[in-house]
Image (cartoon, grey):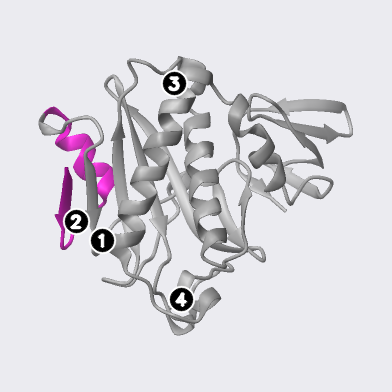
Amino acid sequence: MIIRLDECESTHKFMRENIADLQDWAVVAAEFQTGGHGRHGRAWIAPKGKNLCFNILLPTQNLKPEFYAPTTQIAAITLAKMLREKGINADVKWPNDILVNKHKICGMLSETVGAKISLGIGLNVNTEKSNFAELDRLATSMLIEAGKTFDKEEILLEFIAKFKANFEIICEEGLKPFIDEWRKMGCFVGHSAQIDGLKGVIEAVQDDGSLLFRTENGLKTVYSGDLEI
């Protein structure tokens, strides 16, 4: 089921407020969000009708609690691989931002709603360079990178199908089947970085999806945070 909205405050909020009426794998997609946001409440600015802004309601009855957060990482890997298949050289910046040449093309955010997970995704599809003129950070879109427009509906349906298949694998086998793919996209391993104010060097992405981070006080395992390169 896909609920298509012309405008809303945010698909996250709509899903949270209407959770009782939504089935597993329900999708809420909006042409425009007046209050869309990403991590730490940062505004997600997307011109009307050009991008994908949507939430998917994920069931958790067959998903181990330790895989709730990594599920978003697998969604990022799924979408980045999809973009690569379309000639867009996408990488995943831990934990789940998708970048092209260090320009952000997609952001993800998840939260538990009752006994389910609401996974929110903002993907820049047909945004033009002029739309990013007043943005205070580097950003790009599928149109900018590929030099052509894309059918948003086709992109949405393709992602849902591929991610659903990968979600079923997570439920059955955990993260192990995705680790090699995850590490191939670990383009920031070896770089100096900062995670929530903590400075160090990214040593590795570990088998559980966490980051091994070398600081002046030694190695530290980080399970979540805001990574700045």
Which range is magenta? Answer: 1-20
Residue shown at 66% from the left, 63% from the top: 102
Residue labelled with disc 1: 34
Is 199 rendered above or below residue 115? Answer: below
- For marks 2 and 4, give the CA distance: 24 Å
Residue shown at 71% from the left, 46% from the top: 184
Q: Earlier in the sequence, mark 2 or mark 1?
A: 2
Decide which of 35, 154 is in the foreground and name it.
Answer: 154
Instruction: Judge depth for marks 3 and 2 and give the one in front.
Output: 3
- Asked whether 17 falls inside the magenta stretch, the response is yes
- Asked whether 172 falls inside the magenta stretch, the response is no
Mark 2 crowdedness (10 Å alpha carbons): few <14, some 14-19, many ≥20? some
The kind of residue on which mark 2 rests is: Cys
Residue labelled with disc 3: 171
Residue labelled with disc 4: 143
Residue labelled with disc 2: 8
The kind of residue on which mark 1 rests is: Thr
- For marks 1 and 3, give the CA distance: 34 Å
Numbered label attached to residue 194: none
The kind of residue on which mark 3 rests is: Cys
Q: Is residue 47 left or right of residue 173?
A: left
Label 2 residue SS: loop
- For marks 3 and 2, give the CA distance: 32 Å
Q: Is residue 198 left or right of residue 224?
A: right
Decide which of 119, 152 is in the foreground and name it.
Answer: 152
In the rendered image, the residue lying farthest to the left is 21
